[in-house]
Image (cartoon, rainbow, N blue to C red):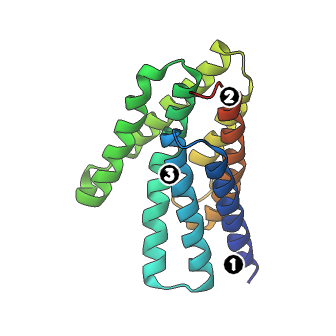
Amino acid sequence: MALILSKNLSATLLVLTSFHSFNRLPPYFYYARAAFKLYMLCGCLLIFDGVRRSSFSVEAVQTVWLWNYCLGLPLISAEICVTAGHLSQFTNVHIILPIYTVLSYHFAPEYVDAYLLGLSHVFSLSCVTILSFTTDNVACIAFAIVYYFAQFRLSPYGNSDPSYMETWCFVMSVGNLFALQLLKRFRWRD
């Protein structure tokens, strides 16, 4: 019972912070708003799975979580680079490898490469960290640290341990707030 309550509480927190971040951004923040929509969907499915567990909900949560894991960080990182006006030429690089991973997962699972996805996430985190030095904004480093723990969460049973889902939701909730503040600190594109 405590595990279900913890899972639902962290999923609710993920939905609330994602919704808050989504609503606070102007409509032309396409990448970040898409990432926050994915996080909201994952949180809603986790709550549904906690209330009424079925084989469909478990499969849906796993699929949507994979989409979040692959696309969330690269979309937000690409948006931060575009908004800051630095490293915006690498926007497509942030997104190409995660999309390849998602498509491979659905159509050719034998070609899914976790190391390639990890390399993509390291690239996204590195770009945001470099922005902290080029823009004198140390919040970029805090964002990179929080997302590092969300993407490369440390589990004694390996990264695929489903019992760490509530930890991931909580860390992503904090990451959503960092991402929103970081996007607000950079100049809005008008």
Q: Amino acid at mark 2?
A: Cys
Front residue (pair 81, 140): 81
Q: Quadrant of residue 157?
A: bottom right
Lateral position of residue 115 relative to residue 169, left or right: left
Q: Is residue 154 visible?
A: no
Instruction: Say which residue appears at 54% left-offset and 72% top-offset.
Output: 45
Label 1, on which residue? Answer: 4
Measured as percent of width and height from the top left, residue 16 is found at: 69, 61
Q: Marks 3 and 2, how far apart in space?
A: 20 Å
Q: Nearer the viewer, mark 1 or mark 2?
A: 2
Above or below residue 131? Residue 160 is below
Instruction: Name which of mark 3 and mark 1 comes first in the sequence.
Output: 1
Q: Secondary structure at mark 2?
A: helix
Label 2, on which residue? Answer: 140
The quarter in which the C terminus is drawn is top right
Task: Name the disc covering residue 37, or none.
Answer: none
Residue reaching furthest to the front: 190
- Classify 10 Å Cα crowding around label 3: few (below 14), some (14-19), many (20 and above): many
Above or below residue 114? Residue 157 is below
Q: Marks 3 and 1, how far apart in space?
A: 22 Å
Q: Marks 1 and 2, how far apart in space?
A: 33 Å
Label 3, on which residue? Answer: 69
Above or below residue 136? Residue 91 is below
Lateral position of residue 8 relative to residue 39, left or right: right
- Classify 10 Å Cα crowding around label 1: few (below 14), some (14-19), many (20 and above): some
The quarter in which the N terminus is drawn is bottom right
Q: Amino acid at mark 3?
A: Tyr
Q: Secondary structure at mark 3?
A: helix
Instruction: Say which residue appears at 54% left-offset and 47% top-offset.
Output: 33
Q: Secondary structure at mark 1?
A: helix
- Classify 10 Å Cα crowding around label 2: few (below 14), some (14-19), many (20 and above): many
Instruction: Say which residue appears at 31% left-offset and 50% top-offset.
Output: 112
